[in-house]
Amino acid sequence: MKLFWTSTFLLSSIFLFSQNIDTLRNRWFLGTGYTAFCGTTFGLLNSQWYSNNQTTSFHWFNDNHEWGGMDKLGHAHTCYQISRGGVAAMRATGFTSKQSAWWGGMSGVIFLTGIEYLDGKSQSWGASPGDLIANTFGGLLGTYQALKPESRNFCFKYSYLNNPIAEVRPEMFGNGPVSRMLKNYNGQTYWLSVPISKKYPFLLASVGYGINGYYGGGDNVFENASGIQDYSKSPRYSEFYASLDIDFTKVPTKSKFLKKTFFLMNYFKFPFPALEYSKIQGIQVRGFR
């Protein structure tokens, strides 16, 4: 859910604020639009997402042991991508490089901190220190790349491949392809991609991390409409990948439309065959990941 809302902000920020107009009016428009977006999102989440859960006093919940770290990678990646969008939006409206790097880079941290506060007021959840740390890391990573152009040669990306575990527990992992992309940690992979050729700077080598066998955050026993479900005999394990990738922002083009499109496409890893390693299956050659 958090990934959906923050990704929506990334998309809207690029398309609404990617024109090179340096006017006070458009700076106010940027600030007002961001504030309105956050306020509307928080209001909708409070009425729709949190309405079925009792509100309580603000409290913390340590979920660092859950989902094999995928939740934290998701927070970091989301904040990093919002940082990219925020920096681009502020640069387009005439702010200095340093102002864009810090305020644009921290826009995701500010946004997700507000959502974390709503989690902290919900009886079913709680504010997660690990989430806040991951959010801050992602925002600072985006800020660092904005301040240091030479550091933009690496990319932090996401990919998804459907995993059958989602069929077993759709109330947790979603009923359709879009919701499962957002909620099914077993199908998600997070990638770090770096260039391997000076002649072709858009060609990258990529390493990825994912999980499998996770029917729940802490264990594989859960309850649904059919009663208690026990998958504790199913192994929970990490998966590591090596593959190739493309940095679309380095693909030569003079088209402004393609540049914007390529900027957005860098959210996802480009599908290539991959080598996978896990303690359960050893080394495997996989199809497009």
Image (spheres, rainbow, N blue to C red):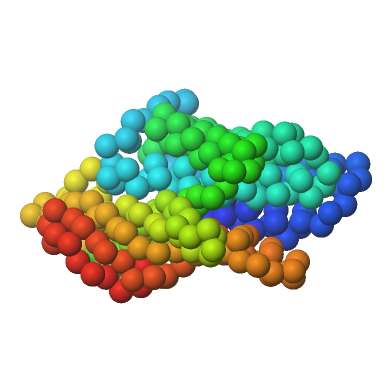
Q: Is residue 106 visible?
A: yes
Q: Is residue 135 above or below residue 12?
A: above
Q: Nearer the viewer, residue 174 or 259?
A: 259
Direction bottom: furthest residue: 287
Residue 43 at x, y percent in the picture: 63, 45
Q: Nearer the viewer, residue 262 or 171?
A: 262
Q: Is residue 170 left or right of residue 47?
A: left
Number of numbered labels in the structure image: 0
Position of residue 68 measured from the top left corner of the image (x, y, whole percent): 27, 45
Residue 67 in the figure: left or right of residue 118:
left
* Residue in the picture at 28% in, 41% down: 66
Residue 246 pos. (x, y %) = 50, 64
Q: Residue furthest left?
A: 233
Asked where in the image residue 182 lies, by quadrant, the reply is bottom left
In the picture shown, does residue 164 fall above or below 121?
A: below
- Image quadrant of residue 11? bottom right
Residue at image coords 87%, 52%: 21
Residue at position x 69%, y 69% from top? Answer: 253
Residue 122 appears in the picture as rendered: no
Name the one closer to the observer, 195 or 180.
195
Counting from the top left corner in percent of width and height, residue 87 is at 68, 44
Q: Residue at x 72, y 34 (%)?
A: 98
Point out the image quarter for the C terminus.
bottom left
